[in-house]
Amino acid sequence: MNYLEQKVWNKNHSTVWREIVSRFGQSEYDDETKRAAHMETLKAEWDAKDYARSRATEYPSIGEQLDDIYHNGVDAWKATIKKTKDKYPKP
C-alpha cells in the first residue's frame, strides 16, 4: 500500500514512515522538526488526491465496466464514468 491509498489519514501508518525515509533519508525522519515538515508535505499530497480515492469507491468494478462496454458500447460506458468524474472533479 502507498500512503496515498490510505482511506483515512494516519500519520503513524508505516507507509508514511517508509515514504519519508525513502524520499528524504533516515536522518530526516529521526529529526522531529524535519519529520513534522515532511509529514505536512505528505498530508498535503494525500489531501490533493481525495478526488481519486472518492472516485475509486464509486466506479463500477472492471468486470461491470467491460460488461457495460460490451452490451451498451463505449459511449454509454463513458457516460457512466463521466457521472463519477463530474461528482469528484480533479482540483
Image: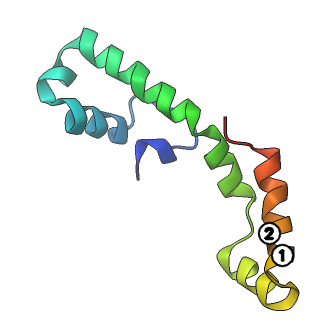
- Could you tell me the amino acid type at mark 2? Lys
- Image-quadrant location for residue 26: top left
Residue at horizontal 21 percent and vertical 34 percent from the top:
21
90 or 29: nearer the viewer: 90
SS type, badge 2: helix
Q: Looking at this view, is 10 or 88 the one in front?
A: 88
Figure check: 6 above or below 61: above
Q: Which mark is residue 78?
A: 2
Considering the numbered disc 1 on the image, is that residue within a helix, a strand or a loop? Answer: helix
On the picture, is 72 further left or further right than 53?
right
Residue 40, quarter of the rendered image: top left
Q: In the rendering, at what x and y percent does residue 28 appear? A: 18, 21
The disc placed on residue 75 is 1
Structure colour scheme? rainbow
- Residue at the bottom extreme, as displayed: 70
- Type of the residue with mark 1: Asp
Residue 12: x %, y % from top left: 38, 30
Q: Are marks 1 and 2 in contact (CB under 8 Å)?
A: yes
Using the image, determine if residue 24 lies above or below residue 75: above
Quadrant of the snapshot with the C terminus: top right
In the drawing, does residue 37 fall left or right of residue 7?
Answer: left
What number is the disc on residue 20?
A: none
Calculate the distance from the C-alpha at mark 1 to the C-alpha at mark 2: 5 Å
Residue 87 position in % (x across, y down): 82, 46
Give the residue drawn at x 47%, y 43%: 4
What residue occupies the far front of the structure in this picture? 75
